[in-house]
Image: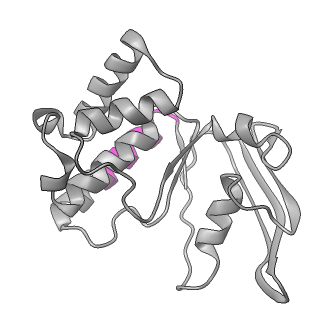
Amino acid sequence: MLNVHNIKKYYEDKQVLKGITFHLKKGESFGLLGPNGAGKSTLIGILTGLIHATSGTITIEGIDVKKETKKAQQMIGIVPQEIALYLHLTAKENLMFWGRMYGLKGKELKSRVQETLELIGLKDRANDQVKVFSGGMKRRVNIGCAILHQPKLLIMDEPTVGIDPQSRSHILETVKTLNGEGMTII
């Protein structure tokens, strides 16, 4: 499903990634661990086609991320380290917005938004503005935006940083559910 082969990244004369290689089968879950400054976020940027590697290749279901970036990106859901939501919009409005960005519309969009609100445990708060949510609730909406289009690969950059234990538990249970349904997760 995902093949990462000998990824190297230099910024000027500083080597940030030194030949990263790993392979994931469909439905696997993979933890990318390392101290601050180890290059995790850089690798995520390369996996998602937002940054180009200096050398090496990444394919998702045989699609080269560097050569066919847009096609590869359609198969990826990304949960960034920072919250990427419109705080003045409701949870539902954020999901509707991001769903449209993924090309969803009509009944399919509405259906996926409802399913996602249920999965992230915020169906009863769908019409509340995100600005009134706790940090953990915002993170759950952020995850909802990333999974709305049912990606084959979900990449999460520190999804539980700075949140309460209850929200952390809910997020980890959501990840287990998605992984159990066959989604590949980093």
**What's drawn in magenta, residue-wise?**
172-182
Where is residue 24 shown, x and y percent of the image? Answer: 68, 50
**Which residue is depicted at the point 63% across and 35% down?**
74
Q: Tell me which corner region of the image, top left, top right, bottom left or bottom right, holds residue 93.
A: top left
Dominant SS of magenta comes to helix
Q: Is residue 163 left or right of residue 179?
A: left
Using the image as rendered, state which of residue 180 and residue 75 is in the foreground: 75
Above or below: residue 182 compared with residue 47? above
Q: Tell me which corner region of the image, top left, top right, bottom left or bottom right, holds residue 109.
A: top left
Q: Is residue 162 left or right of residue 6?
A: left
Q: Tell me which corner region of the image, top left, top right, bottom left or bottom right, holds residue 50.
A: bottom right
Using the image as rendered, state which of residue 107 and residue 93 is in the foreground: 93
Residue sitting farthest toward the right: 55
**Which residue is depicted at the point 44% across and 65% down?**
81
Above or below: residue 4 compared with residue 27? below
User: Quadrant of the image for the C terminus?
Assistant: bottom right
Using the image as rendered, state which of residue 83 and residue 165 is in the foreground: 83
